[in-house]
Image: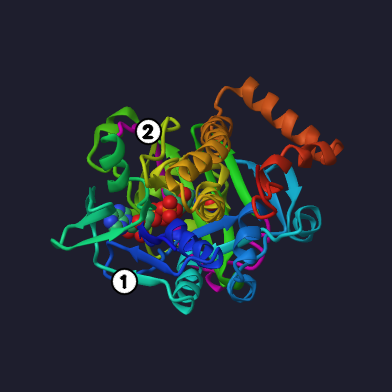
Amino acid sequence: MQSIGIVGGGIGGLTLALACRQAGFKDIYVYEQASHIEGLGAGIQLSPNASRVLIALGLKNALTGVASYPQAVHLRAWQSGYLVAQRPLGQFSEDRYGFPYYHLHRADLHQVLLDAALANQVTIATGKTCLSLDTHQGKERINFADGSDAAHDVVIGCDGIHSAVRKTLFGADEPRFTGHVAWRGMVKADRLPKGLISSAVTAWMGPKKHFVHYYVSRGELVNFVGVVEAAEEAQKDSWSEESWRRSGDKAEIVEDFRDWHPSIATLINAADQCFKWALYDRDPLANWSAGRVTLLGDACHPMLPYMAQGAAMAIEDAWVLSRMLENWEDETAKGFLEYERYRRPRTSKVQLGSRAQGQQFHLSDKWKVLKRNLRLGFGSRFLPDVAMQQLDWLHGYDCVKGFD
Ligand SMILES: Cc1cc2nc3c(=O)[nH]c(=O)nc-3n(C[C@H](O)[C@H](O)[C@H](O)COP(=O)(O)OP(=O)(O)OC[C@H]3O[C@@H](n4cnc5c(N)ncnc54)[C@H](O)[C@@H]3O)c2cc1C
């Protein structure tokens, strides 16, 4: 039985540890750079393609205790609030795909994953920043910033967008700053006027900007993300930084959404703090694996957040990779190539789809806006079944039942 070293204790790394445990592996180590594992003060949407994996890992009860359940997706015009299009979620999602659409606080999701990993005898070492890897006495060795090292039969880099494992395998990548900056914040629901925020996840689409909000934590909190295409000058500024923890000046986001529907200003003003994240884009990677080392999640396919699928893809990866490790235990390198072969087309499609989705949200030309709104509105009002079918490839994907 192989010993598995996982670099990164984020959503992807912890899900992988659990999936490997369920596949029968016993010797599983997660190395996390932070001094303790914690989620951030942000929300996350998990569509049925991801919730089915988490439920297969036995997390249904724990997630039910902390989730919110959006009843629909609403797409609205930025200024008038006109409902351009809608799609049902909630019970509809469960009936169509068999699994729920969750809205979660990231801290809750991390806690659920961490508790399950510890209960399943996964070893978690914190304060371990991976700097590089090498092969030593037939094992893959992880070298840490504190001077220590650890050797395993296989190593998986789940260390996110700035992956040190990816750099060791394939060199530094060259992301492109999209010029898009994501603001985010969280507000206690009872601070807001009653009825301001509906039970739908709502995306307001406007010229060069969009704004999304939804409930998390059983409806106790409202999470929001506002994306703006920053001016050229601002792009050169020092805040073009990919980080969840960079706080920003609230007055700036108020200004960014000044002419928008008044409910957006009410929501932003109720937040104690806002954070900003500069959004970078990367092309799909040609290779994910080298020998007995591979990558998972943002480490190999970071994507723009416009389809809300980055974590979902990491969760799907985790299930598939654990089963490939099980099936190819004596030939891990081949198993890793199979994992890539199976996963890369799907994650590349979502990566490129997210890029395109951002462009659709941010249209400014009034004819293009009209065309988009007519297309979305017609589909949702007159051909709802056809509109829903367009998402089946994404939300209906079932890696749990097996794969070729
Ligand atoms: C604004 C925004 C909104 C989003 N909304 C959604 C959404 O609604 N739904 C969705 O599915 N996705 C969403 N995403 C994407 C999602 O957050 C990511 O795709 C997901 O977190 C990736 O998980 P991961 O485990 O691969 O990486 P991460 O979550 O980044 O975890 C990486 C872990 O590795 C650790 N680490 C990093 N370097 C090292 C090192 N050298 N050594 C040891 N440990 C290391 C980090 O501390 C971290 O714990 C959003 C992203 C953004 C920016």
Does 107 sit above or below residue 260? below
Does 39 sit above or below residue 385? below
Q: Nearer the viewer, residue 251 or 273?
A: 273
The magenta stretch is 173-200
Label 1: how many Cα within 10 Å (few below 14, some 14–19, many 20+) = few
Whichever of callouts 2 and 1 sits on the residue coming sooner in the sequence is 1
Q: Residue furthest right?
A: 382
Amino acid identity at mark 2? Gly
Q: Which residue is painted at 64% across and 76% down in the image? A: 61
Say how many tags the image has.
2
Q: Which numbered circle lies on residue 179?
A: 2
Q: Which residue is painted at 64% across and 20% down in the image? A: 367
Say whether residue 158 is left or right of residue 56: left
Amino acid identity at mark 1? His
Residue 225 x, y percent position in the rendering? 48, 51
Foreground tag (2 vs 1): 1
Residue identified by numbered label 1: 36
Quadrant into which the N terminus falls: bottom left
Q: Residue furthest bottom?
A: 119
Residue 334 x, y percent position in the rendering? 47, 41
Task: Determine whether the residue tagged by mark 2 lies in a helix, strand or loop.
Answer: strand
Does 265 sit above or below residue 112? above
Does 255 sit above or below residue 220? above
Residue 325 x, y percent position in the rendering? 50, 53
